[in-house]
Image: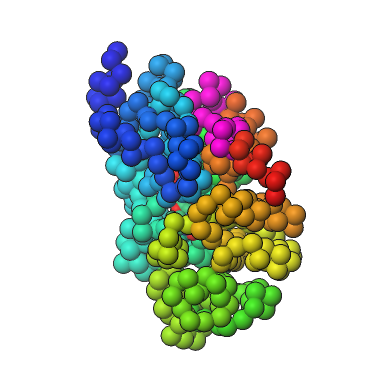
Amino acid sequence: MNLQTGFSKLTKVEAHPEVLEIYRYDFSFIPKILSGFVKKPLLVVQPSKVEDLIRILEICERFELSIVPRGSATSAYGGCVPLKENCVVVDFKRMSNFEFRDDCVVAESGAIWMEIEREANRLGKALRIYPTSALVSTVGGWIAQGGHGVGSLRYGGIENNLEWIEVVDFKGLRVVKGSELRRYIGAFGTTGLIARACIKLRENREIKARAIDCKFSDAILMVEGAYHANFKDSKLMQMEGYQTQDTLMLCSENIESNELGAEIWTKRLTPLRSASKGKRIFSEVVLPYERAVDFYENAKRVADGIEAIFSRDCVVFLASFTTGCREMLKSLKFVKIAEKFGGNVYATGMLFSHKSSKELRDFKRKVDPKGLLNPKKLEPNVFSRIIRTLRIFL
Ligand SMILES: Cc1cc2nc3c(=O)[nH]c(=O)nc-3n(C[C@H](O)[C@H](O)[C@H](O)COP(=O)(O)OP(=O)(O)OC[C@H]3O[C@@H](n4cnc5c(N)ncnc54)[C@H](O)[C@@H]3O)c2cc1C
C-alpha cells in the first residue's frame, strides 16, 4: 500500500512542504538555535470521523510512523510539534461537530470552545468552564493539555467537567470516564487520540464582574463563592493599558458590577495583551491555596507581571517575561520558587516532559509499546534536558 493513497482514501492529506513547515510551530517560544530539533512532519492528515482515526492509527502502526495530534496549536508547551522524523500530524480541524443532550454537550475534538458556548447560550445553557483561548482553541487540545479556565473557581478543572471522553488507540475506540480520565487529561495525546467528549453545562445566568483594588493577600480571602476570579498585579495592569493598582476581578451572578470590572470581563478572551509590548515568555505554575500568598510574595520580584487565576482547589499563576536568555532563566526561577512552596509547573508537554508522572509513563508503555503516540513528550528530550540543566544555575 502506498502511504499517501492509503491515507487519502479516508481523509484530507496535506503534503506541500510549505504547509508542512507551519506544523513545526505552536505557541511556545523556541530559541532559533534549537529550532532544528523540531522536525517537519512527513504528512498532515485531517480526519473527519472516528473511523478515520482508527484507520490512521492502523496505517501508522503498520509503517511505524509516529503520530502527533494537533488542535489549534495555542498551547505554549510544544505539545503538538513533532520531535521525530517520519511523523504524521493528525489535525482535528475537520472533526468539529457537536450536539446538545440534556445538561451536556457531546463535541468532537476539533470543536472550538467559543462556538459551543454561543450555541449553548441560544438554548439557555452555558459552558461551566472554558480557557481564555476559547475563541480558537479546541475541545481535544484543552483536555489533552489539561487545565483551569474561566469558571474553574466554582467548577474546578477540566477533569471535573467531563462525563466521558472517547479515545482511539491501537486497539480501537474506548469510552473513558471517572478516575481513568487522568490517563488522558494532561497527557498531551501520548496515550491516545481524543475523538469526542461529553462536557457538562450550566444554566446560562448572566455573570457580572467587579474590579477591586487590593493586595493579593486580601484578594485570596474574597473569592469564595464566586463563579470566577482573577488577580493582576499593577505591573501587568499597566502593561495591559490600565492606570491602576493590583486588582482583583470578582465575577458572579449576584455581584454589583463596576466599569473597570465590566471592561476586564469583556476582554477576558483577548488575554496576554501585554504580548503586544514585544515578544514575551510566559511561565505558569499551580499552587495549593495555603501556600499561595507566600509564593506570591517571593515570586513577584522575579516577574515583569503576575496574574493569578483562582480555581476550586488551587491557584494558577501566570508570569510574563520579555524574551532573552536572562529572562528565560527568570521564568525557570519562577517555577523553582513554586516548587519550593509545594507547587508545580502548570503542564508538562515538550518543555517539562521530565516532570511527567511515572503512572502516566507506565500506562503509555502498556497502550503504546512501540512509542508511536506523540513521542518524546513524556520522556526527557533535548528541550527538557536543557531546562533541567539550566535549573542548576538558578
Ligand atoms: C491567549 C491564550 C490564552 C490561554 N488561556 C488558557 C486558559 O485559560 N487555561 C488553560 O488551561 N490554557 C490556556 N491557554 C493554553 C491553551 O490555549 C489551551 O491549553 C488550549 O485549550 C489548547 O488547545 P489547542 O486546540 O490549541 O491545542 P493544541 O495546542 O493544538 O494541543 C495541545 C496538546 O494537546 C494535544 N492534542 C490536541 N488535540 C488532541 C486530541 N484530539 N487528542 C489527543 N491529544 C490532542 C497536542 O498534541 C498537544 O500536545 C491559553 C493559550 C493562549 C495562547
Whether residue 138 sits left or right of residue 77 in the image: it is left
User: Is 269 in front, or is 48?
Assistant: 269
Residue plotted at (35% across, 49% down): 111
Q: Looking at the picture, how far across and down is residue 51, in whole percent?
A: 34, 31
The answer to whether 60 is drawn above or below residue 257 in the figure is: above
Q: Position of residue 4 (x, y in %)?
A: 27, 21
Q: How is the image coloured?
A: rainbow
Magenta stretch, overall SS:
loop
Residue 261 lies, with reference to residue 88, above or below; the image says below
Where in the figure is residue 169, as x and y percent of width and height? Answer: 47, 29
Numbered disc total: 0
**Magenta run includes residue 380:** yes
| Residue 153 sits inside the magenta stretch | no
Of residues 85 and 148, which is closer to you in this image? 85
Q: Nearer the viewer, residue 116 or 209?
A: 209
Q: Which residues are magenta?
A: 366-384
Query: For the point 43% across and 75% down, which residue is it?
Result: 241
Q: Residue at x 36, y 59 (%)?
A: 135
Q: Quadrant of residue 382?
A: top right
Residue 283: horizontal and vertical position, in percent?
Answer: 57, 55
Q: Depth check: 337 or 150 in front?
A: 337
**Could one spot residue 66 in this view of the protein?**
yes
* Outermost residue, top side: 1
Q: Residue at x 74, y 66 (%)?
A: 294
